Amino acid sequence: MTGAEGEKQNERKEKSVWEKMKQGRDVEFHPLSGFIIILQGQTRILAPVKMADVVQPDPNSLQIPGDNLSAPSSPATARNDCSITPLTPSPSPRVEVRPRMSCPFSVVVAIDFGTTSSGYAFSFTQDSEAIHMMKRWEGGDPGVANQKSPTCLLLTPDLRFHSFGFAARDFYHDLDPEEARHWLYFDKFKMKIHSTSDLTMETELEAVNGRRVRAIEVFAHALRFFREHALKEVKDQSSSVLEGEEIRWVITVPAVWRQPAKQFMREAAYLAGLVSPDCPEQLLIALEPEAASIYCRKLRLHQVIDLSLQPVTNGLDLEGSRPFDSSFRQAREQLRRSRHSRTFLVESGTGELWSELQTGDRYVVADCGGGTVDLTVHQIEQPQGTLKELYKASGTNLTKLKYKTKFFSVSKAVVFLPGGPYGAVGVDLAFEAMLCQIFGEDFIQSFKAKRPAAWVDLTIAFEARKRTAAPGRANALNISLPFSFIDYYKRHRGQSVEAALRRSNMNIVKWSSQGMLRLTQEAMNELFQPTIINIVKHIEELMVKPEVRGVRFLFLVGGFAESPMLQKAVQRALGRTCRIIIPHDVGLTILKGAVLFGLDPTVVRVRRCPLTYGVGVLNRFVEGRHPRDKLLIKEGREWCTDILDRFVSVDQSVALGEVVKRSYTPARLGQRKIIINIYCSTTDDITYISDPGVRKCGTITLDLPEPLPLPGAVGGAGGPERREIRATMQFGDTEIKVTAVDVMSNRSVRASIDFLSN
């Protein structure tokens, strides 16, 4: 390193320290709001009182032995009767503006952790217009560009990490069938986080062989794998030695994931050693459609396919001269040539596409992945180029995956998270249902349990052929059946696979003497259409909402957006309504956008709150207004219990840097913790935390430091004054954050928010 380079590096480090110091001092203080924790039996409640009305509590009723925690189920104030007003979308919100500053890290590494495939990319902050993609993965299918790796992981029989991605898939494939039964193979395991409504640190995943392992350990193994690969490649391309604190990590998640799932990924990253829990700002959780939207801002016209340019009739353009998918073949060829280089250059400002947008124009990003379909509505703000979310990430109710086609039915006990219908996995489940219809569900379940490696081989073969399915395709798709499948069926049923096909009367699937299932075009339509119809319906329902009418663009991104079957269906349904844009590198759009988000996390300025959040409080009981069963008489005063004090409301616009502040007072002198329960609801039409649809979703913990002695106190003891702990909550980021300060001493209070312990 030259002397000039050393000086520049020291200057960057000094600037980083200075920026962090500035952030640490940015604290706003307000007068005491007045809260007293009242304990009634085992129920701990926080009652708002005026300072002039503070009543010294009965020592017996406030007794907390040893280090027991004060856990108020109803901490805070009611918004109607107290001086603190919850955050509202008023014309003049209290905003602590986060200044646009240079990134305090030397490199940003993003991990796109997908349901079916995953990958990483990185960018050096001194050359932020260059995004470096990971090296091509070893293994994989011939002719497939392996820019991402399958999301599959292999553990040894004694639960040690063995391999990830293609290496895991290929090793598991080569195992002896009897030996494979003892190895733990996990595939598409991100789905578990979608479908678990009571996610905790103890949630388990089931491997293909039926053995169970804590989910947090499986995810940590995968993230540790990416960490090691990424660090090696970053160091190979860096001219200087990078310290751990110089790297910012970004992990992508679906936009409709709730706070427990986001916290789960963060905890897995801590366990994997990406960052330390003491430096949480080193890790960002990026929302997948947001990341795609951020990258789409940079696109030039030659980097996209516009499906709206030529209306399509029966697979041909209006002149009848060009097959529907020819533009896609041209784009894929261009992309194949460009993949010799793994460095992508992005615009320093916004791309040509945005020159057509006026201030206030809106667009939809449809992230069609393997497990979910996320829809987000954004508006670009000129001239700064920031983004504003206009409608919260869309979703459907929890339900089972159930539908019936002409030839088979799908009824799977799979829970939909909000995020719409399943993506590409819906097609996989339909294929499994088709096999059950032909060979019998009992046989398929037995084969999966007894020959797990062969079942994985079969799903891989289908995945490879699924990618080639296109509308109007004349030739059948051939899917190789593993020899063990053919042999196991003959021994299990006493007849051949060919005989089973004939007996099923499913004439859309033929048998080839080469040991293959031949799926006709009608068969592929049967597999694809239920999922595609649901996706298109999902988008159409969003488009008619008042907040979304008049959108200019619909961006299709995500792995499933590569499917010509989905492209054609969306084009036919919406091509005359708005411009449908598909980036050439559609499968890498989210990954690149995640890098850009890590370089500038302030680019999304306004988000919509997915839920109503608040706490339960006591308020003055008003006869005729509050129900009698909520009446609590304490110290001669009448209180109404369980009133919800809203922090934010569902679908409320929350700006980046906008905060909610509350003050809390320990129940007794010497108390070392305050625990506050958080409640949430999918609606805003609620009054009490006991209303239908309201549930406890998390806790805020405030660790109280030893109080400083007051000036002039005898023997260094503090006075009897109650302490005010000022908690500040942010709802405008991708994760809910909380900080706290002891107002009297101006010292920070360790504050944490937990959504995984319910």
Image (spheres, helix red, strand yellow):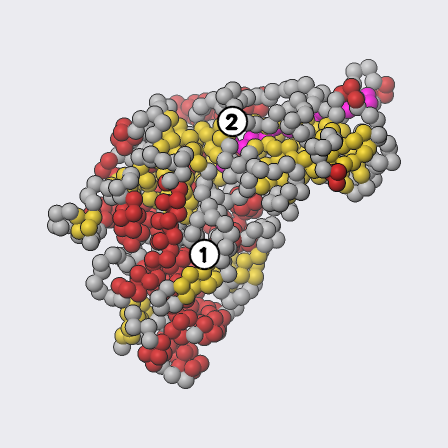
Residue 647: image quadrant is: top right
Position of 180 relative to 227 (above/below): below
At 40% across and 42% down in the image, what residue appears?
A: 542
- Whether 217 is among the magenta residues is no
Distance from disc 2 to disc 1, alpha carbons, whole Å, reads 39 Å
- Whether 725 is among the magenta residues is yes
At 26% across and 43% down in the image, what residue appears?
A: 575
Q: Give the prevailing secondary structure in the magenta stretch.
A: loop
Residue 120 in view in this figure: no
- Which of 656 and 93 lies nearest the eye of the viewer? 93
Q: Position of residue 18 (x, y in %)?
A: 52, 21
- Which of 639 and 351 lies nearest the eye of the viewer? 639
User: Which amino acid does the dot numbered 1 rest on?
Assistant: Lys
Kind of element beneath mark 2: loop
User: Which amino acid does the dot numbered 2 rest on?
Assistant: Pro
- Which of 8 and 575 lies nearest the eye of the viewer? 575
The span shown in magenta is 719-734
Residue 313 in view in this figure: yes
At 70% across and 37% down in the image, what residue appears?
A: 642
At 67% across and 29% down in the image, what residue appears?
A: 78
State the residue position of label 2: 89
- Tell me, yes or no, whether the two marked residues, 2 and 1, touch with CB atoms within 8 Å: no
Q: Which mark is residue 188?
A: 1
